[in-house]
Amino acid sequence: MGCVSSVQRHLAAENADASEASRSASSQSIHFVKTPSVAQVHEGVLSEMVRFRRPNIRDSAGFEVVDSEEVTLLIQGGATEGPQLLPEEQQAVVTALRENVIFSCMQTEQLQSLAKCMFVQVVKPGETVITEGEIGDKFYAVRSGRFDVVANNGHTINRLVVGSTFGELGLIYRAKRTATVISDPMASGSLFALPGKYFRYVAAQRSMETFQSSLDALKKVKLLESLTAEQLEVVATFVYSLQYRPGDTIVHKGEPGRVMYMIQSGTVVCTDIGSGSAAIAKVQLKEGDYFGERALLSAEPRSATVVAHTDVRVIALDQTTFTSLLGPLQQLLDYNRMLRTLESITVMKKVPYALKKKLLDSARIVHFEPNETILNEGDHGDTFYILKEGEAKMLQQPKSRSSSSASSSSNPPSPIHKIIPLNNGNVEPPPPPLEVARILPGDTFGELAILDRRRQPASIVACTKVECFALTSRDFDNIFESVKNDLYDLARQKEIVSSDKLFAHSITLSSLKYISAIGMGSFGVVHMAEHVPTGRFVAVKEMWKSRLEQLRQTHHIQNCWGLGILIYEMVVGDSPFSSPDEDHLAVCRNILHGHILFPVDCDSDWKSIVQALLQRQPEKRASMIAGSLLDVRREKWLAGFDWKSFTRRVMPTPWIPDVTSEIDTKYFPKVSKEELAEFDSCKDHKPVGNWEGF
C-alpha cells in the first residue's frame, strides 16, 4: 500500500527479532555512497508518478516553501513544531531512514540534517494519525507504541511497531493517503514527524552544494583544463562521493587505474612512488589535491599506493562514465585544442561558436610521413590545415635580385620563375630553400588559400609523422551556406522570445478576462484568460505560495527519461513502471529497481531505445549530447528521422487539431468541480491585484 514504507516486515511483535536484526545491519557505517542530486534521489519518480491522468495524485500546489534560514536554525538546534529529538533518538531515526526506499540513496549527513528537522508527536490511545483520502505532507517514524493500518472497509491490514515508517510519498508530492493509521486503542504512542518542506529543501540544497564542489574540484585538474564549461558541468553531475577511514587503502600500486580521485576533505599519503633511483618514499596530499588523473586516458598501472591518513572524503570519476558522457578523453582534448586554435584565427574571430564547431566537425584527418611534402611553394592551394600531432617545417626559396621587384605582388613567384638564367646561357639550379619556421601541434597553415585562392607563399614539409585536420574552401563554403538559414532562424527565434518576454512582463491582473479552467499543473490550477488590450489569449498559473525560495538551476544534461516513458506508453498503452493496484510506492520501487515488462513479440530496435532511455543511472542513460557514445540519435529505431528539420523547427506537424476558435478547449481534459474544490485553500492566499474573476 502507498502510505506504508518498505519496512513493513515489522508487522507484529513476534517479528521483533527479525526487525532488530535488520535495523542493526542498517546501522553499520556505509561507504562508497553515490553523491545524490535531486534527479538521482528520485530517479524518474516525479516524472512518472506525478501524472495528470492519475485522479488520486495531486501535485505540489499546496507545498509550503521553506526559508533557508529556517532550516539552518533547525539543524543548529533551533525550535521545531514539537519537542526536539535527543541525540540517541536522532541516530535511531537515521537508522530507520536508511531502511526506507525514498532515503536509500541519501548520504549520512543529509539523514542527520533531516533527523534534526524532525519533532516528537505524542499520540493518544485510538487517535487517528492520518486518514485515507486526505492530502499528506508529513513523514512519520514510530518512536513508541503500536499503530494499526486500517483500510476503508475497517479491516486492519498491517501493524506498525517501533522503527516502522509511513507517509513517505507526502515528501515528494501531495499524494492522497491510501489508508488510515490509528494508534493502539489501549495505549498512547509517539512518532518522529518530518514536514515535507524540510525534506525537499535538504535534498535540493545538498545537491547544489555537491554539484558546485565537484565542479570546483574538476576545474583544478590540469588534465581537464581544456574542457569547456559545459563539458565540466556535465561531468560534475555524475561524479561519485566516497568515504574512507584512517588506514583504508584507496589505490594499490601496480593495479590498473580506471578512477580519478579529488580530495574534498582529509589527507592521504602516497607511498612506494616510482621505482629505482627515482623512487620517492612518501608524499602527503590534502583537500583540493587530486590523484589518478591518468586513469581517464588509459588503464595504465598505478604508480603508487594511496592510503587514507585521516577520515577522507573524495570525489571519484571513472573512465567508463567519462567516456559514456563525452567520449574518449584524448579525442575530446584533441578536439577542444583544435577548436581553440580555430577560434584564435583572425578571420574566425567574429564567427559564432556554434558555426566554428560545425566547421571543425566537417574536417577530415590526413596523415603524412617524415620528409613528405604537404604543400609546395607557389602552388594554388585549396586546403587549410591544423596540425594535430607531429612536427613540420616551413621552407621558402630565397628571393633573387631579379625577382625582388615582384616581391610586392600579392602572389609569390611560381617555381618556374625561380630558375635563374646565367650570362653564358646555362641555367643555374635554384638555391636550396631556407627553413623559416617550425610548425607544432595547434599551429595552422594554408589559411590564405581559403580566403582568396592565393598561391602558397612557402612549402610545408613533415619532420616527423604528422596528423592534421584538413578543411577545404568547399568545406567553408558549404558550412556558411548551410548555416544561413540556421542563423536566420536563431535571430528570428530570439526576436520572438524577446517579444514574448516583453509581453509577459507587461501583463497585469486587471487586464485579463477570465475564460475557463483548462487543467492542473505542478503548481495549481491553470486558467485560460484573454488579455483585453491586445486580444491575445494566455494560460495563467494560479500560484498561492507565500514566498519562493530562489535556487540556482544549472543545465547539465538533456535528460531523455520522459521521452522513454512517452515512447513506451504510445506503443504499449500503459506506463512501464505501473502497479496493477495503483500502489504509488510500488511504482517508486519499480523505477528504482528498473523493472520494465516488454511484450514478447516487441520490435527489438524499439525495446533497445526504451531500455537506453530508461536507464536508472543517468550516466548510462541515452542523451542528446553530440559525440557521446550514448547519443540517442545512434539508435536504430530512429534511423531515417530528419534531425536537421527537427532542430531547425521546419518539420511538418504530424497532426493539427481541428479547433473552431482561439478559445476552443475541447482537447483539454475537463476539470471537475470536485477537483477545483480541493484547491479552495488558495482563497486564503490571494495574490495582489484584481483577481476576482478567478
Image: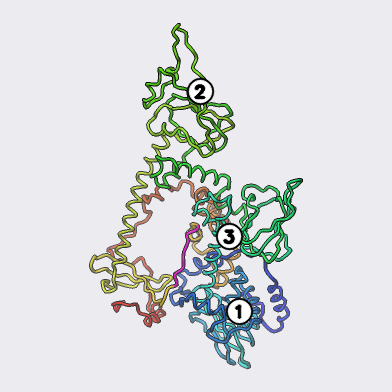
Q: Secondary structure at mark 2?
A: loop
Q: Amino acid at mark 2?
A: Pro
Mark 2 / mark 1, whichever is N-terminal: 1
Q: Nearer the viewer, mark 2 or mark 3?
A: 2
Residue placed farthest to the front in the image?
401
Mark 2 / mark 3, whichever is N-terminal: 2
Where's residue 532, x and y in %?
24, 69
Quarter assignment of residue 359: top left
Where's residue 462, x and y in %?
55, 30
Q: CA distance from mark 2 to mark 3?
A: 60 Å
Q: Nearer the viewer, residue 17 or 74?
A: 74
Please rate how many residues cluster around mark 2, counting C-alpha atoms within 10 Å: few if below 14, some from 14 to 19, many from 20: some
Q: Is residue 10 left or right of residue 523?
A: right
**Residue under pointer 2:** 433
Please rate how many residues cluster around mark 3, counting C-alpha atoms within 10 Å: few if below 14, some from 14 to 19, many from 20: few
Quarter assignment of residue 334: top right
Q: Find out whether the residues at labels 2 and 1 contact each other: C-beta distance under 8 Å.
A: no
Q: Secondary structure at mark 1?
A: strand
Q: Nearer the viewer, residue 651 or 77?
A: 77
Q: CA distance from mark 2 to mark 1?
A: 85 Å
Look at the magenta stretch and give its main secondary structure. loop
Where's residue 109, x and y in %?
61, 71
Span of residues in magenta:
549-556
Image position of 688 with respect to 241: above or below: below
**Residue under pointer 3:** 617
Q: Secondary structure at mark 3?
A: loop
Q: Amino acid at mark 1?
A: Thr
Q: Quadrant of the N terminus?
A: bottom right
**Residue under pointer 1:** 165
